[in-house]
Image: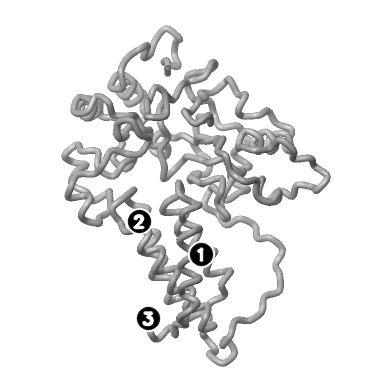
Amino acid sequence: MLVHPEGPSQGVRGGGPMDVAVWLAGRGYPVHPLAPGGKTPAANCRDCRESEHAPEACPCRAERRWCHGFHAATTDLRTVREWWQTEPDFGIGVACGAAGLVVIDVDAHSAPLPDRQRLLPGIAIDDRVDLTGLRSGFDTLALLAAHRSRPNPCEDASTLRVRTPSGGMHIWYRAPKDGPRFRCSSGSSSRVALAWQVDVRAIGGYIVAPSTRTSAGVYEALPGARVPAALPLWLAAELVRTGHDGQPVAPAPARAKRAPRGRGRQGQGSGQGDRVLASLLEEVRACGLSPSGTAFSEKLNRAAFTAGGLVAAGHLVEEEGRRLLLEAADGARPHQTRRNVLIVDAGLRAGRERPIQPKERA
C-alpha cells in the first residue's frame, strides 16, 4: 500500500478503495473510478454514451460525475468520497498527466518475438547478440538499460513499483517539472515506442493504482519505496529519443521510392490525396478526447478505406498513408495498437479495390 512520503508510519494501511482514493487525491494525485472488477474507466452516463462531445465541455464535470475516464479525474475530496460511496467496489485510476507522472508499464504477455530491430526502436541489435530466452518487456527493458550501462528500472527499489495481476510491472516516476511533456505509447507501436512490450503511461493516459482488485487479481506494491522517485535522466533522454515528447523521430535512411501511378499525369495528385485524407485523419484524432462512444473503429476504417482508394488511383504513397493512419490511431487509442493495425491494414486492402479520385471526396 502507498504510504506518506514524510514518514513510513503515515498513509493508508489496510483500508478500502475509498480510503486509498482519498489518500491519493489528498496528496495531489487526481483519481477517477474504474469499473468494478476491471481496469477500464467506469461507464459514462447515458447522455455521454449517446452523444459525441469534448470532455472539457461536458456538463457532467460540473455535476461531479465520473464521465470520460481520466478526463474527469479530480483531487476534490468531497467528489472522491461521493464516487466511492456510490460504488464501493470501484477500482482506482490515476490520471498520469495531471498527476505529473511517467509510468513505465512492463508487459509479460505471451507473443511471438518480432524482428530484432523492433525490440529497441532506433537501436540496431547486432546479429551476434544472442537473444535466446528473451520473451517479455522485462527482457527488453533490461536490454535497453544494459545497452546504456544503466541500472535496470525493474530493480529500482527507490521508486514505487507495482506488480500487476498479469505478471507485469508498473514503475512509477515523477515527470521533470520543467522538462518535456511526455505522452503515452504502446510497446508494439510502429511509430512511438520505448521497447517491445514496454508501454509508457503519461499525458493522455492513466494508470491503475495499487490495491485495486480486478477479476484477474490485485495490483500490489512491491517492497521498496512507496512513492514515485524522479524520472532518471537517462530514461528521460530515451523518451525524447523515441519521440515521446511529441517531436518527430529522426527518420531512418531514406530508400528510393517508385512514383505512384498517375502522379506524372495528375500533376498535383499526391497533394490532393493528402488533403482528402487529412480531414478523415482529424476525425480519428478527435476520438482521443473521449475513451469511448466516438465510433472510433468506424472512422478509422473509413479513413483507411479512402487511403487505399487514393493509393490505387495514384494519389497517395501507400507507405506514407499507412504511417499517417497508424499515427492518428495510436494517438487516439494508444492502448489498442494491435487492433489499430488490423483495422488500418484491412481498410487499405479493401480500398485498393476501388480507386478514388480526389474530386469524388471534395
Q: Looking at the image, tell me whether mark 2 or mark 3 is earlier in sequence order.
A: 2
Residue at horizontal 47 percent and vertical 56 percent from the top: 340
Q: Residue furthest bottom?
A: 265
Disc sitting over residue 345 in the figure: 1
Q: Quadrant of the C terminus?
A: bottom left
Q: Nearer the viewer, residue 316 or 166?
A: 166
The Cα–Cα distance between marks 2 and 3, rounded to whole angstroms, is 22 Å
Q: Looking at the image, tell me whether mark 2 or mark 1 is earlier in sequence order.
A: 2
Decide: few, some or many residues near mark 3? Use Cα within 10 Å; few <14, some 14-19, many ≥20.
few
Task: Name the residue carrying label 2.
Answer: 287
Q: Which amino acid type is marked by label 2?
A: Cys
Q: Mark 2 near mark 3, Cβ–Cβ under 8 Å?
A: no
- 18 relative to 111 in the view: left or right: left
The quadrant in which residue 256 appears is: bottom right
Number of the front mark, 2 or 1: 1
Q: Secondary structure at mark 3?
A: helix
Task: Name the residue carrying label 3.
Answer: 361
Image location of residue 236, percent across then percent down: 59, 39
Q: Which amino acid type is marked by label 1?
A: Asp
Q: Quadrant of the N terminus?
A: top left
Number of the front mark, 3 or 1: 1
The Cα–Cα distance between marks 3 and 1, rounded to whole angstroms, is 21 Å
Q: How many marks can you see?
A: 3
Residue 176 in sight = no
Image location of residue 225, percent across then percent down: 52, 18
The quadrant in which residue 282 appears is: bottom left
